[in-house]
Amino acid sequence: MAITKKFSAYDGQKISFLTQHGKDRVVADVLNPVLGCRIERVTGYDTDLLGTFTRDIPRAGTQIEAARKKARTGMSLSGLSIGIASEGSFGPDPFAGVFPWNLEILIFIDDERDIEICGAAQGKANFSHSLASGWSEAESFAREAGFPGQHLVVRPEGEIDPRIRKGIASWKDLENAFEWASGQSKTGQVFLETDGRAHANPVRMENIRLASEDLLRKILSACPACNAPGFWVVDRIPGLPCRNCGGGTQDFLADVYGCIKCGHRARQERSDWKYADPLHCDYCNP
């Protein structure tokens, strides 16, 4: 995404980012050149306490609540009035429920302007697991998962076994972990899964980059009434006319943009399509 426009309000500003998995570098590469800001990585708090993908620590609350808590914690530790945080989730794809899916959320909190803006991206995930009875099965799973670029997690016996080795990123470490897990397993089986942490999961890191671009677009969209950033789509108006009969359909006709600061609203007509496919028309396709 080539964006050269700058939102001068953040030029030279420091923005906190609490993370221990390298996400700040990807986000900074997107935001810093355009906003003129400086994202600063914040340490001093174990973000795994808010939940882990390996299920040893469940996440409390929703995805957005976890991201907000991370941002607020980073702002508190750094003493900065602006903060960013990221939170990801994995689940089945929203279309067929067959493929693993990744949703990434970035939250941007600006206490000086009393605003909160969210960016998001989603797509197919590299999130899989396998039970292996021997090294050849483990090796096959690792290669299919994209190891060693994609890191792995190993447990004896099954996915809920509390004995765990994370962050496995070399073949030697994987062999050692497999031997350890085999020796611990009463069944002789070893449970392997992809590591879901951002620094260990290149596919997820790419979705974080895309979420950063989405966040940037929203920050750059200023309210025409008060100039606050984050003027973005808050609703959609249905009624796009059917190409066949001309009647209104449930396809959206226009977007409604709203300001998170002053509440200003503006309607913007859809520009990509003038007519809806008759398949989406209740009259032509009842």
Image: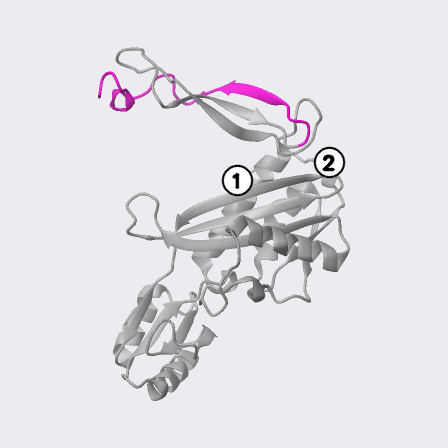
Residue 58 % position (x, y): 49, 64
Q: Residue 93: give x, y in percent of width and height.
A: 34, 48
Residue placed furthest toward the front: 61
Give the extent of the magenta segment: 261-286
Horizontal relation, residue 90 to residue 75: left or right: left
Of residue 145 and residue 180, the one placed in the foreground of this image is 180
Q: Nearer the viewer, mark 1 or mark 2?
A: 2
Local secondary structure at mark 1 = loop
* Amino acid at circle 1: Met
Which percent across, then down, holds residue 231? 61, 30
Q: Is residue 248 left or right of residue 41?
A: left
Query: Residue 266's mark?
Result: none
Q: For numbered disc 2, what is the local secondary structure?
A: helix
Q: Is residue 111 magenta?
A: no
Q: Is residue 119 above or below residue 182?
A: above
Q: Label 2 belongs to which residue? A: 8
Taking the spot 54% from the left edge, 19% from the top edge, the residue there is: 267
Secondary structure mostly taken by the magenta-highlighted segment of the chain: loop
Give the answer, above or below, for where 156 lies relative to 144: below
Q: Is residue 36 left or right of residue 207?
A: right
Front position in the image: 100 or 68:
68
Report if residue 40 is visible in the image: no
Residue 82, position as x, y percentages in the image: 71, 47
Question: Can you tell which quarter of the image residue 218 is in?
Answer: top right
Disc 1: which residue: 1
**Residue projecting furthest to the top:** 246
Closer to the chain start, of discs 1 and 2, is 1
| In the image, residue 10 above or below residue 259 | below
Camera-side residue of 78 and 187: 187
Residue closest to the eye, 62 or 183: 62
